[in-house]
């Protein structure tokens, strides 16, 4: 379906409609998965595990500065970053008005009709760049 700037996109009727209200844990799970499923996420974990291994082997024995740095590096991607992502999730869900009302997704032959309250946004299938599924979550990247 071709779209110019002045045309309104009209999708065929939805065959399946799903209504979703995103919660804090849903947002947290998305952020964790998004951050730690990339190469940089895995690299961060490896840095933390490597620092923890160096800490356990006693590389910094007797040097307080090195010991403190290794402790910080050990905790950075395994404890600190997930806690920061959880806090960002809480803030985003509670403070962003978009997450206060359910969002309805109508899946049809031409694309997805996203509705929330009075607002509607059609998304054609060629505008969907990635879909990932895990457990009870499906993420559609547009």
Image (cartoon, rainbow, N blue to C red):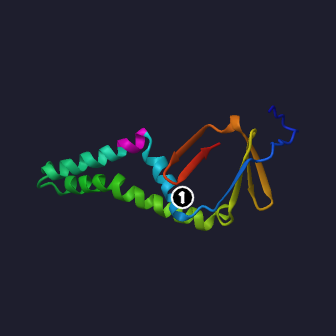
Q: Residues within 10 Å of mark 1 (few under 14, many from 20)?
A: some
Is 50 located above or below residue 115 in the figure?
above
Q: Position of residue 71 (x, y in %)?
A: 25, 56
Image quarter in which the N terminus is found: top right
Q: Main secondary structure of the magenta part?
A: helix
Q: Residue at image x 80%, y 46%? A: 13
Residue 88 in percent (x, y) is at: 51, 61
Query: Can you say whether 109 is above or below 114 in the image?
Result: above
Residue 50 is one of the magenta-drawn residues:
no
Say what secondary structure mark 1 lies in: helix
Question: Is residue 40 located in the magenta-colored stretch of the structure?
Answer: yes
Residue 91 or 108: which is nearer the viewer? 108
- Residue 113 against residue 129 in the figure, above or below: below
User: Which residue position is annotated with label 1?
Assistant: 27
87 to the left or right of 56: right
Report x, y in % for residue 140: 61, 45
Residue beneath the point at 53% across and 65% down: 90
Quadrant location of residue 109? Answer: top right
Q: Quadrant of the C terminus?
A: top right
Question: Is 96 situated left or right of 68 in this image?
Answer: right
Residue 74 image offset from top left, x and y in percent: 28, 53
Q: Range of the magenta residues?
A: 39-43
| Residue drawn where x is 65% and y is 39% of the image | 128
């Amino acid at each position: 379906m071709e779209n110019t700037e002045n045309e309104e996109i009209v999708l065929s009727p939805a065959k399946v409609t799903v209504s979703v209200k995103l919660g804090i844990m849903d947002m947290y799970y998305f952020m964790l998965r998004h951050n730690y499923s990339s190469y940089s996420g895995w690299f961060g974990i490896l840095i933390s595990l490597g620092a923890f291994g160096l800490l356990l082997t006693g590389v910094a024995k007797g040097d307080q500065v090195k010991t403190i740095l290794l402790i910080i590096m050990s905790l950075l991607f395994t404890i600190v970053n997930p806690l920061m992502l959880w806090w960002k999730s809480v803030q985003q869900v509670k403070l962003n008005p978009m997450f206060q009302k359910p969002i309805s997704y109508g899946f049809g032959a031409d694309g997805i009709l996203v509705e929330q309250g009075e607002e509607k946004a059609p998304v054609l299938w060629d505008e969907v760049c990635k879909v990932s599924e895990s457990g009870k979550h499906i993420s559609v990247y547009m």
